[in-house]
Amino acid sequence: MADGIVIVGLDGVVRFSNPAAQHLFGRSAGELQGTHLGYPVVAGESFEIEIVRPDGAAVGAELRVVDLEWDGVPAHLVSLRDVTDRKRADERASQLEEERLARAEAEAANRTKSEFLAMMSHELRTPLNAVIGYAELLELGIPGALTEEQVTQVSRILTSARHLLGLVNEVLDLARIDAGRLAVERSASPASLAIDAAVAVAQPMAEARGVSVEVTRDGLARAVYDGDESRVRQILVNLLSNAIKFTEPGGRVVVQAGVAHEAPPEARLTGTGPWVYLRVEDNGIGIPSDRLAAIFDPFVQVDASHTRPKDGSGLGLTISRRLARLMNGDVSVRSEAGRGSAFTLWLPAAPVGGHDTMTQSSEDVRGETRLHGVADAGEALLRELGAVISAFVARLRAERIIPSADSLRFSQLADHAATYLADLAAVLIAAEESRGQPTSLVSGASEIQRLMAERHGARRARLGWSRETLAREWRILREEVERAVRGHTASIPPDGLSEALTLIARFMSQAEDVSARALLRAGRDTEMGEPEARLSGTTRFPTPDS
């Protein structure tokens, strides 16, 4: 029999045992016979016991008792069934259930925390933006001239407020990702746009630390990814900021991009590729091998001591990797202590032919012959700025681009278009002066235009603009700009005029695309319960109609 059978006299002494019982007790028949069973036996009862073998191992057994006669003497037949595996399974199931409940409680608590922080977005950012906005107005001297000491104090307020806003934005971004409230867009975008914009943001920090930032253009034209351009730019800014921060003065940071058909094993990617990679490599202090796995955890820094030389929340890499994975990509790292680090953003490559517009990079703006006269076009645009804006607003009203166009103020319809066009004119002038070579002035101006376009799209969303209305508005503005520049044909060389109009069309097309994304994002955030999109952490000035 598979079950152990033991015959026990009324005195509790074992009279007989079968091989299964001997195996269960870990003793021979001779060792068992004549010994006391050690457990009280009552007919009709069934219970579990624990048998301790000579080697110290414990075995669980289910015990059942019936009465019988053994050699004509009343006795008990005890059946023993090994239930060790069943008991372990029950204990494991109970443990798993306890762990499941604990995990569910922890996830519910974390979800509640994340939802709370996500809902606090507007409440936290609004007062911070107000502090920054009014401090900037004071710094500009709009309410009145400040003394040198007052300027210093206001500058400190601005620095601290912007730092705090950056920390708040990082915490809220992480909370929105955890709460499942952060959506990413998917479209074909050239890597050059995101790289140039990120370098423009990081360049002042690099110059202040004495670190050079270089962009390797080889292979850049072929790198077109499928993802959210604004989030890719955010990831690159995080990677560049870290690289600059942990590279000593005189060091170098190199940014490169390309296409790979296979990704390295450290990148957690799904799919067969090809992949676009955007890599930020430095020759800084590097990361010890035992810390590489932890740097993507929230609130973790390589140097976690209270005396660490670099500040920060420790969320930049966490947010970067999670954003990358939301776009079906990843962020990987290779580093060696004392020799630098290389962080790589991996993204799915866009289908061939999926991006027909905006594929030309700043490399195309070259050649002294073509650029001769572009600065003249920029200066002409500056001179005609007032007339362009007036004509632009007049056409918006005449065409009743939205039903409420007549009731909107001039400043609401113009919406800082003059600032955008002035910056565009400055880019044309700088492009010729630099002979088409990359400069911090051109890249910085491009970043200003992008920020203005983002804010423009968000404000148009609040006024009820649609995607089609926005496209019509940008077309009107471009027509007025081109009309103003063509009015100075006599003073601008033909090649320069043609190149200037090409650059204007390209920059305004990119700005329209950025505005459209901001408009859609603002509308989506409003539907999700947030009164205003984040606008990439830019300052929101307090205005009477906001």
Image: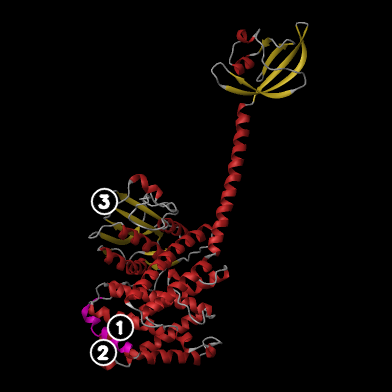
**Disc 3 versus disc 1: distance between alpha carbons?**
44 Å
- Contact, mark 2 vs mark 1 (Cβ under 8 Å): yes
Measured as percent of width and height from the top left, residue 54 is found at 56, 16
Reading the chain from its start, which is encountered first: label 3 or label 2? 3
Q: Nearer the viewer, residue 396 or 165?
A: 165
The kind of secondary structure element at disc 1 is: helix
* Residue 500: mark in rendering: 1
On-image quarter of the N terminus: top right
Q: Nearer the viewer, residue 263 or 75?
A: 75
Q: Nearer the viewer, residue 478 or 202?
A: 202
Measured as percent of width and height from the top left, residue 133 is found at 43, 75
Q: Nearer the viewer, residue 437 or 390?
A: 390
Residue name at image x 31 percent, y 53 percent: 341
Bounds of the magenta span? Answer: 366-382
Q: Which residue is mark 3?
A: 339
Q: Quadrant of residue 141?
A: bottom left
371 with respect to 393 (left or right): left
Would you say residue 359 is visible in this rendering? no
Badge 2: residue crowd in 10 Å (few <14, some 14–19, many ≥20) = many
Reading the chain from its start, which is encountered first: label 2 or label 1? 2
Q: Which residue is mark 2?
A: 492
